[in-house]
Image (cartoon, rainbow, N blue to C red):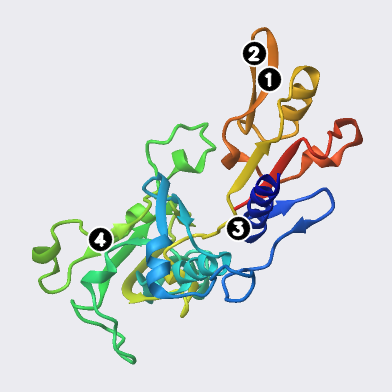
């Protein structure tokens, strides 16, 4: 009996140390335990060797423009530090200098320069050096140059009853695909043709009407998000605690249907076993931790029925 009680206490202590618990009116166990002396007999002191042994990254989903991964074995404060590094410390290439040769569009020069500066550039920053302060022209070792020259004219072949500007005019919209890379020095020999370009070709820069023109030279340099947001390699970087939903007992029948309806889609599902409907936890990752299960009186379930944790 004493052994069973000790096991329960050990399990509960581990939950308190490693999981945040969501209650109806509160969130408990939010304190960090990544320091010594918090719990008797447990060494929570931090050292590099222990961190390297416990820490791992599991990639959940990766695409050209996004990545989702789990950071296992770290405190939330460390995860937040990685997030801030992603936002502010990783170098990228971005447009720093805009030399406006002609701009007769409705967009003011400074607004146009700002819009151009925020266009993400597909260029590996490891290939370039940081530009020296005060150097406006740059060199092949630290600068990628683009040219944007476009003029709007009337379309002589437009239908007489046309009202759409894209039918009436040519080049009425300026897109990032209109930016042309101008190799400097031996850049084309080193990196190949069309090595550098905007990440997306369909970002709208400006709208023009007949007679209006934009002619600018753009210099991209290496920088970090701490200096300017345009150098940040991510549009956003966020983290959250991984949800953990567990049932303390079997939930069947109408109660199972009520329970499944309280959670986000695909967190739980109904499975029929021997003709009886059972609620089964399928993928807690999809849970948004809304605590809907506690919210409405009509959906109020026994308090000891399930556990809601974030780990």
Disc 2 and disc 1 in contact, CB within 8 angstroms? yes
User: Which callout, 4 or 2, points at the residue further toward the start of the chain?
Assistant: 4
In the picture provided, is 204 more to the left or to the right than 188?
right
Residue at which label 3 appears: 18
Q: Quadrant of residue 34?
A: bottom right
In the picture provided, is 309 more to the left or to the right than 122?
right
User: Which callout, 4 or 3, points at the residue further toward the start of the chain?
Assistant: 3
Instruction: Measure how far apart labels 2 and 3 are at the Cα level.
Output: 34 Å
Instruction: Measure how far apart labels 4 and 3 are at the Cα level.
Output: 46 Å
Please provide percent x and percent y for residue 265.
64, 32
Q: Nearer the viewer, mark 1 or mark 4?
A: 1
* Residue 49 marker: none
User: Which callout, 1 or 3, points at the residue further toward the start of the chain?
Assistant: 3
Q: Considering only vertical position in the picture, is 81 above or below 280?
A: below
Residue at which label 4 appears: 196
User: Which callout, 1 or 4, points at the residue further toward the start of the chain?
Assistant: 4
Of residues 69 and 301, the one drawn nearer to the viewer in this rendering: 301
Residue at which label 1 appears: 278
Please provide percent x and percent y for residue 186.
10, 71
User: Which callout, 2 or 3, points at the residue further toward the start of the chain?
Assistant: 3
Which residue does the image show at 62% across and 44% down from the upper left? 244
User: Tag 4's secondary structure?
Assistant: loop
Of residues 92 and 251, the one drawn nearer to the viewer in this rendering: 251
Which residue does the image show at 15% across and 56% down from the upper left? 193
């Amino acid at each position: 009996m004493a052994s069973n009680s000790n096991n329960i206490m050990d399990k509960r202590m581990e939950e308190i140390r490693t999981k945040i618990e969501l209650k109806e009116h509160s969130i408990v166990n939010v304190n960090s335990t990544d320091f010594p002396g918090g719990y008797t007999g447990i060494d929570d002191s931090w050292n590099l060797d222990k961190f390297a042994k416990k820490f791992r990254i599991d990639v959940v989903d990766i695409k050209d423009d996004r990545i989702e991964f789990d950071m296992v074995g770290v405190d939330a404060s460390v995860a937040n530090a990685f997030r801030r590094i992603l936002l502010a410390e990783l170098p990228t290439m971005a447009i720093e200098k805009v030399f406006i040769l002609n701009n007769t569009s409705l967009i003011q020069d400074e607004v146009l320069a700002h819009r151009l500066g925020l266009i993400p550039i597909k260029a590996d920053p490891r290939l370039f050096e940081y530009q020296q302060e005060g150097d406006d022209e740059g060199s092949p070792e630290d600068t990628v140059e683009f040219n944007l020259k476009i003029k709007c004219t009337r379309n002589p072949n437009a239908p007489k009853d046309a009202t759409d500007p894209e039918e009436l005019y040519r080049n009425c919209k300026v897109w990032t695909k209109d930016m042309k890379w101008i190799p400097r020095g031996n850049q084309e020999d080193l990196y190949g043709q069309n090595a550098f370009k905007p990440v997306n070709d369909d970002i709208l820069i400006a709208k023009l009407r007949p007679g209006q023109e934009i002619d600018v030279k753009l210099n991209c340099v290496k920088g970090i998000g701490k200096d300017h947001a345009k150098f940040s390699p991510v549009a956003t970087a966020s983290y959250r605690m991984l949800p953990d939903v567990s049932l303390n007992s079997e939930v069947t029948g109408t109660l199972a249907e009520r329970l499944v309806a309280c959670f986000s889609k695909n967190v739980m599902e109904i499975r029929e076993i021997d003709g009886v409907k059972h609620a089964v936890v399928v993928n807690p990752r999809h849970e948004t931790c809304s605590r809907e299960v506690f919210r409405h009186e009509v959906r109020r379930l026994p308090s000891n029925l399930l556990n809601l944790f974030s780990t």
